[in-house]
Image (cartoon, helix red, strand yellow):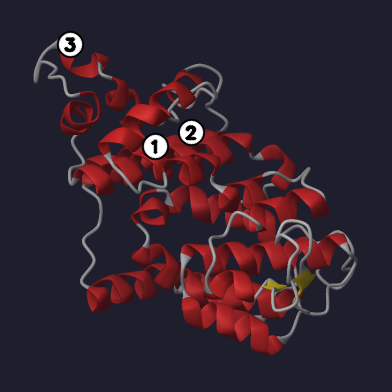
């Protein structure tokens, strides 16, 4: 895959957000069928065949758009506990694809992690006391032990923290742990993707975005924009799909229907080939459905 600078990936950001939103809808509704989702969210029935079949809101979502904010209250009312807003913002995709993010932007994305083990590997909250977490937080220092602990967790949030910590280190001119972070990302990626339908549906876009993200190291002369790679990182990258298949089998995970995976592959293929001016732009319009 060709090198893709992070600053040139807004359509991959869109693809990751749309895939995550649709997976969340499918997960909460118990169905990948957009008509079923439509019925459960809006309590109304659309025709199952003919032109009217594809006029529903969630047919557009299935085809690559992002759910518009005006539909969020209906979705939340239909599916209590949904994380549709988090996946619509998709801070993981933001860190991966938005090359203009400075330190504050990365920290803001990391701050969306819910309370749990992942956040403890980003901030030490033991001394917050009477002050709010937003006003007072101490970053946990970078270390091999911290990286290994995030790999062990193997969640979407731990992947976000790994990538966010790596980008923060790069922005601060510290590249000594670059390869350790890269190996950690590829090591944990099959587990993170297998456990998350949101990442699994958008795995093609995720890999394309990672290619650009991991090739961007502005302060590290030794990396030569990815021409010199660590052997372990290369092997982990090459073996991603076989390890993903093994992990899905081990966890007894069922992949999204092939129809949906095919739609997402086509979107990413169009993005990478530059065929985005008309058809792809309609499918992945920033305004959403």
Residue shown at the point (18%, 47%) measured from the top left? 30
- Evaluate if marks 2 and 1 touch, with contact meaning CB atoms under 8 Å apart: yes
Considering depth in this image, is 237 or 186 the residue closer to the camera?
Answer: 186
Look at the numbered disc 3 and give the secondary structure of its residue: helix
Can you give x and y, in whole percent of width and height, for residue 36 in the image? 16, 32
- Mark drawn on residue 244: none
Residue denoted by label 1: 266
Considering depth in this image, is 196 or 207 the residue closer to the camera?
Answer: 196
- Residue 6 is left or right of residue 156, and the answer is right
Q: For the residues marked 2 and 1, what is the alpha-carbon distance in whole angstroms?
A: 6 Å
Tell me the mark number nearer the camera, choosing from 2 and 3: 3
- Residue 252 is left or right of residue 62, and the answer is left
Residue denoted by label 2: 270
Residue denoted by label 3: 52
Q: Residue furthest top?
A: 51
Label 1: few (<14), some (14–19) or many (≥20) C-alpha neighbours in 10 Å: some
Can you give x and y, in whole percent of width and height, for residue 204 in the image? 44, 50
């Amino acid at each position: 895959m060709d090198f893709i600078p992070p600053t040139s990936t807004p359509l991959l950001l869109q693809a990751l957000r749309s895939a995550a939103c649709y997976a969340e809808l499918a997960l909460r509704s118990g169905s990948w069928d957009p008509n079923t989702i439509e019925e459960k969210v809006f309590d109304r029935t659309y025709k199952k065949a003919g032109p009217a079949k594809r006029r529903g809101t969630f047919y557009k979502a299935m085809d690559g758009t992002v759910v518009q904010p005006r539909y969020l209250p209906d979705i939340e009312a239909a599916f209590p506990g949904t994380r549709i807003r988090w996946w619509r913002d998709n801070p993981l995709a933001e860190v991966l694809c938005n090359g203009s993010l400075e330190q504050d932007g990365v920290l803001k994305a990391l701050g969306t992690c819910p309370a749990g083990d992942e956040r403890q590997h980003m901030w030490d909250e033991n001394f917050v006391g009477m002050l709010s977490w937003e006003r007072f937080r101490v970053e946990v220092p970078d270390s091999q032990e911290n990286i290994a602990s995030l790999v062990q967790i193997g969640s979407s949030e731990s992947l976000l923290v790994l990538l966010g910590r790596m980008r923060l280190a790069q922005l601060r001119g510290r590249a000594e742990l670059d390869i350790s972070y890269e190996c950690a990302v590829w090591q944990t990626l099959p587990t993170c993707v297998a456990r998350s339908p949101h990442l699994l549906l958008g795995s093609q876009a995720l890999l394309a975005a990672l290619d650009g993200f991991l090739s961007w190291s502005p302060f590290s002369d030794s990396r030569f924009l990815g021409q010199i790679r660590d052997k372990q990182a290369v092997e982990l990258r090459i073996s991603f799909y076989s390890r993903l298949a093994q992990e899905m089998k081990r966890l007894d995970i069922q992949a999204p229907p092939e129809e949906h995976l095919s739609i997402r592959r086509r979107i990413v293929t169009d993005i990478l080939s530059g065929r985005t001016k008309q058809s792809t732009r309609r499918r992945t319009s920033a305004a959403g459905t």
